[in-house]
Image: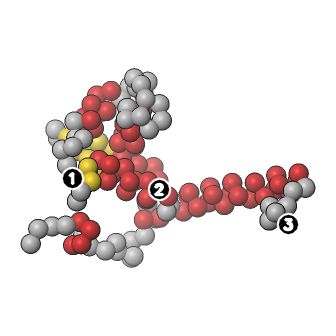
Amino acid sequence: MQFHPSRTSPKPNPAIPLNRLNGLHYLDAPGAVRRGEAISRRDIVSYFANMAGGVHLGPSKSGKEQTHALVQGLINKIRADIIDGLFFELLSIGQAIGRSDDLKKLVDTIRAISECEEHARGSNPEGS
């Protein structure tokens, strides 16, 4: 039987919630390995943001050119089911951060500030 990630991969273990991971440790942990060199999740995100047109598109000013070259060397070299492996890793990173307690706190804070500003302007956020 051939391994198929969407059908045969183990379910997440609820006994180890992802939210317990420290965000900095999570981003600095290896997300890929190329030529024996570990590439952190932070560097994978940086590659997509700066080199693959995600945010800045252009020469890197972070001094990460060598790491970005390692990441670029993995494009179309690994697969996760039908998705390029690095795109899958980027999606996984986004999901993990999006579900984190820290991001939930940030969202709650932004909403509270927005509600305070609307109240101060005298507007009704319900639209009535």
As displayed, is residue 81 above or below residue 29?
below
Give the class, few, some or many, for how many residues have Cα within 10 Å of label 3's Cα (few <14, many ≥20). few
Q: Between residues 11 and 85, which one lies in front from this camera angle?
A: 85
Residue 6 seen? yes
Q: Describe residue 56's horizontal placement relative to residue 9 as left or right.
A: right
Instruction: Choose top left, top right, bottom left or bottom right for residue 80.
Output: bottom left
Give the class, few, some or many, for how many residues have Cα within 10 Å of label 2's Cα (few <14, many ≥20). some
**Between marks 1 and 3 in the image, the one whose residue lies nearer the viewer:** 3
Secondary structure beneath label 2: helix
Residue at image location 27% in from the left, 35% down from the top: 72
Give the class, few, some or many, for how many residues have Cα within 10 Å of label 1's Cα (few <14, many ≥20). some
Reading the image, the residue beneath label 1 is 79
Q: Report if the CB atoms under discs 2 and 1 are less than 8 Å apart.
A: no
Q: Quadrant of the N terminus?
A: bottom left
In the picture, the disc for residue 46 is none
- Counting from the top left corner in percent of width and height, residue 8 is at 21, 72
Count up the numbered dots. 3
Residue at the outermost right position: 122
Residue type beneath disc 2: Ile
Circle nearer the N terminus (2, 1): 1
Reading the image, the residue beneath label 3 is 128
Secondary structure beneath label 1: strand
Residue at image location 69% in from the left, 54% down from the top: 110
The residues tagged by marks 2 and 1 sit, at their Cα atoms, a distance apart of 22 Å
